[in-house]
Amino acid sequence: MEKIQLNKVLPNVFRGRALTGSDIWENDVCFEKGKFYLIEANSGTGKSSLCSFLYGYRNDYQGNIMFDNEDIARYPIAQWVELRKQHLALLWQELRLFPELTAWENVQIKNQMTKFQTDLQIAQWFDLLGIGDKRDALIGRMSYGQQQRVALIRTLCQPADFIFADEPISHLDEQNSQLMADLLTQEAKRQGAAVIATSIGKRLELKYDTTFKL
């Protein structure tokens, strides 16, 4: 997939409201593979909704979202399954990890489906992000910042043309935030993927090509 286009998209919940200052809602926007984008937003302006729309998780919007000039509203479930396995990766704001499983098991759930990363690579990422000693810890007993690092590793266990990161460092200190940024940059560039990151104040420090206000 080479590009994502938004044509006059607006969440249904915002219908009838007077919106001003948004670069995204009710505008024409294009995201291109290989570029880095930051979406800065205030709380309640729809940044998580935007990620859900682009991931095909929700469709409660007006306007059109196009993947390579095809309207995603027409996609059947089987096509979405394939897109999420091969083209779209999402680091959810709420992480969506399984608290009863270990950190390693949470990552392997995805990697066993995709066969995309080696166990050695995953182990090296755990060490790089300072959670190598937490591989066998239950996610439910780890701090939120540690969980965010596990969630990033899981996100990178698949091929992707577009990687969505919804407030990925909200609970991390500066050092760990930079480690996350470096890892995401390295893997995105290796795959030639675009990164679309959101922020309500604490932003992931990447070399962004474009910054949008939501």
Image (tube, rainbow, N blue to C red):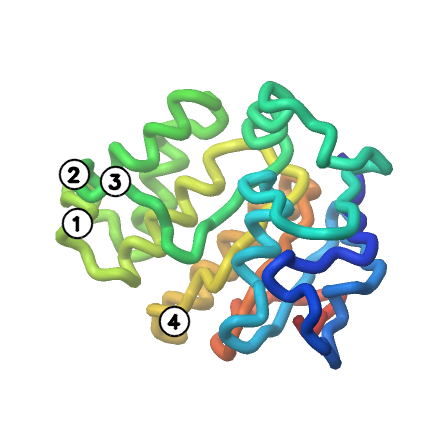
Please report contact status of discs 1 and 4: CB closer than 8 Å, yes or no: no
Residue at image location 42% in from the left, 65% down from the top:
169
Q: Which residue is mark 4?
A: 175
Q: CA distance from mark 3 to mark 4?
A: 26 Å
Per the image, the residue denoted by label 3 is 98
- Between 56 and 30, the one lying in front of the other is 56
C-beta proximity under 8 Å, tags 2 and 4: no
Q: Are marks 3 and 1 in contact (CB under 8 Å)?
A: no
Label 1: which secondary element: helix
> How far apart, in angstroms, are the residues tagged by discs 2 and 4?
28 Å
C-alpha distance separating marks 2 and 1 = 7 Å
Q: What type is the residue that disc 1 sits on? A: Gly
For marks 1 and 4, give the one nearer the viewer: 1
Q: Amino acid at mark 2?
A: Glu
Name the secondary structure under disc 3: loop
Task: Tell me the kind of residue under disc 3.
Answer: Phe
Q: Quadrant of the N terminus?
A: top right
Q: What's under tag 4, amino acid-wise?
A: Gln
User: Which percent across, then down, holds residue 197?
Assistant: 58, 60
- Whether pointer 2 and pointer 1 mark residues with C-beta atoms closer than 8 Å, the reply is yes
Q: Are marks 3 and 4 in contact (CB under 8 Å)?
A: no
What residue sits 71% from the left and 70% below the top? 212
Q: CA distance from mark 3 to mark 2?
A: 6 Å
The earlier-in-sequence mark between 3 and 4 is 3
Say which mark, if any, is on residue 99: none
- The mark nearer the N terminus, 2 or 4, is 2
Q: Find the distance from the CA under tag 1 to the CA under tag 4.
A: 23 Å
Above or below 3: residue 48? below
